[in-house]
Amino acid sequence: MKAFARSLSILVLASGVAAGTAGSALAVFSGEMSPTVRSGDGDYADGMEAFREEDWPAAITAFSKVVERRPHHDNAWSLLGFSLRKSGNHERALDAYGRALSINPHHRGAMEYLGEAYLDLGRLRDAKILLLRLGDECRRVALTVSDGDFEDGCSEYATLKASIQSYERDPEARVEPVAQEW
C-alpha cells in the first residue's frame, strides 16, 4: 500500500514538473492548497462552522437537526456529544457518544471524546478502559494500512493518553485538548 501511494505521489509530482507546476503539486501534497469544502448538508455545515468557532449552543442546534434527519450520521452524533459536553450537559453527551459508537464502533474521535467525558465526570477507570479499546482500534487500523506502529499516527490515542496522565497528576488542573475535525 505504501509503495502504491509513493508511486502515485511521484507520478503526480512528475506530471506537475512536466507541466511546470511543481510548486503547486507540492503545495497540494502538503495540504497548503487543499480546499475546505462546505458540506452539502446545510445543517451539518452550520454545525461544523459553529464547532470551529466553539459556539456550542449553535453547534448543538445544528447537529441536533442533522441527527434528527439522518440518525445514522456517526460524525454528527460525535460532534453533538462534544458540543453538549463543552456546554456542561454530560448526560446527553454520553448518550450522543454512545449513539455514534453504536453506529460505528470504530469511530476513534467518539472514543477519545467519550474518554474525555469520563474524566470530566471523575470516571478514571472508564477512561482507561476506553483508552485500551482505542489502542486496539488504532492497532487494527495501523495493521491494515501501515507497519502496525500506531503511536505516531493515532492522535486520538495520544490525546486521550495525555489527558489521562494529566488527570492522574492533578484532576483539577487537567487541560482540555483541542477538538479535532474529521
Image (cartoon, grey):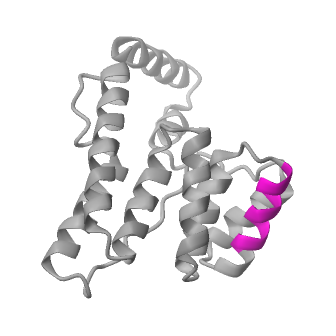
Place of residue 8 in the rendered image (x, y in percent of width and height, measured from the top left): 47, 16
Residue 141, image quadrant: top left
What residue lies at 64% left-to-right and 64% top-to-bottom? Answer: 80
Place of residue 53 in the rendered image (x, y in percent of width and height, measured from the top left): 62, 76
Residue 5, image quadrant: top left
Place of residue 56 in the rendered image (x, y in percent of width and height, measured from the top left): 64, 78
What residue lies at 59% left-to-right and 64% top-to-bottom? Answer: 81
Name the foreground residue: 86 vs 95.
Answer: 95
User: Which SS does the magenta portion mostly show?
Assistant: helix
The span picked out in magenta is 59-69
Name the foreground residue: 3 vs 56.
Answer: 56
Quarter of the image with the N terminus is top left
Q: Is residue 116 above or below residue 100?
A: below
What residue lies at 45% left-to-right and 61% top-to-bottom? Answer: 113
Side (left or right) of 19 relative to 144: right
Place of residue 79 in the rendered image (x, y in percent of width and height, measured from the top left): 61, 60
